[in-house]
Image (tube, rainbow, N blue to C red):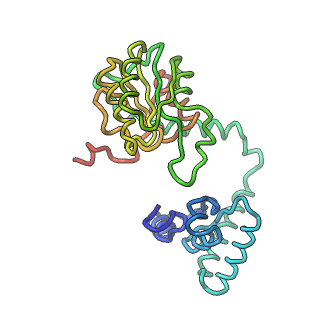
Amino acid sequence: MTAVCPPPLSRRIVTGLLRGEMSFTGLVTSDCMEMQAVQKFFGSVNGVLAAMNAGVDLVLLSHTTLLSGEAAKAAAEALQSGKLDRKEMEESVDRILAAKAKLAAVPAAAFDAEQAAALNDKLLRATITEVHVPKAGRPNVGGHPLCLGCQVYRTGLVGNVVDDVQQSFPVMMAKALGGDGFTTPIDPSEDEIYEWVRRAESYTSIVIGTYNGHLHPQQLEMVKALAQNSGKPVTVVALRNPYDLFPLPESVYTLAAYEYTAHSTAAVADVLLGRHAATGRLPIATPEQEAQ
């Protein structure tokens, strides 16, 4: 979000940053203008006009036919009245037609669902990032790890990840590693943290998934308590923002997965089992780098 509106509605971001500073020449596509962040605060039709004015080429209205008609009529009127810049609209049309021509030139045989899925998996695995390796090295999870972490939850007005993830990270990870998985609260209490420290005694290692732990510090307190008091090697996986990983003890092995999905969980499990390396690059500076 900018200070005043979502990025697809911001001319400063779409035209100023994306087109101007970053020199992006491809098609810009919006989110659906029926998402609550637009619908609730701007209205879907006004959102369409704002996105077009911001420089978006393809503005999506994905669900309601009536709204699509209203938006098309409003856009035509805005173009006639000069509220939308005709030259910019023509440039958008040219980009759309050019993209259609390129797509038409691609042989139908070039589209292979299995190859696309394999490429998607390859790219996802390449993003898994090893953020911190303890002096003792990457821990061996052993034959009976304890897997913990909260269930995915909505962090804002948009997003369908809650519907896409049928099982929690700890349950999925336990199935992959051969241990036990338990879903913990978003903000575990001191008593709950103490109980997990006690129960960790019978496990070979601990694998914890955090989800916005920098906003829910009790998740990180649980990590610290287990790292300092369980006597077991601890691995932490950031399932959204990697900021969760910075205020943790040196002994904790950390990975950034960037998303809470079954695919990312499987990729992390393969890293922990030594089947492939975590080769991703952290897109932000660590506190140590910022201090230099």
**Residue at image point 49% right, 64% down:** 18
State the image coordinates of residue 14 (x, y, percent, origin top left). Answer: 51, 67
User: Please, which residue is most extreme toward the left here?
Assistant: 292
In this rendered view, identify the residue nearer to me: 29 or 168.
Answer: 168
**Residue at image point 58% right, 50% down:** 159
Side (left or right) of 89 relative to 186: right
State the image coordinates of residue 152 (x, y, percent, origin top left). Answer: 53, 39
In this rendered view, identify the residue nearer to me: 257 or 107.
Answer: 257
In this rendered view, identify the residue nearer to me: 6 or 154.
Answer: 154
Side (left or right) of 155 relative to 233: right
Q: To which quarter of the image does residue 9 belong?
A: bottom right
**Residue at image point 64% right, 65% down:** 59
**Residue at image point 66% right, 41% down:** 116
In this rendered view, identify the residue nearer to me: 242 or 196.
Answer: 196
State the image coordinates of residue 37 (x, y, percent, origin top left). Answer: 56, 60
User: Please, which residue is most extreme toward the bottom here?
Assistant: 81
Q: To which quarter of the image does residue 214 belong?
A: top left
Task: Please determine whether, in this image, residue 197 is positioned above or below residue 114.
Answer: above
Task: Please determine whether, in this image, residue 280 is positioned above or below residue 180.
Answer: below
Q: To which quarter of the image does residue 17 belong?
A: bottom left
Count of picture labels: 0
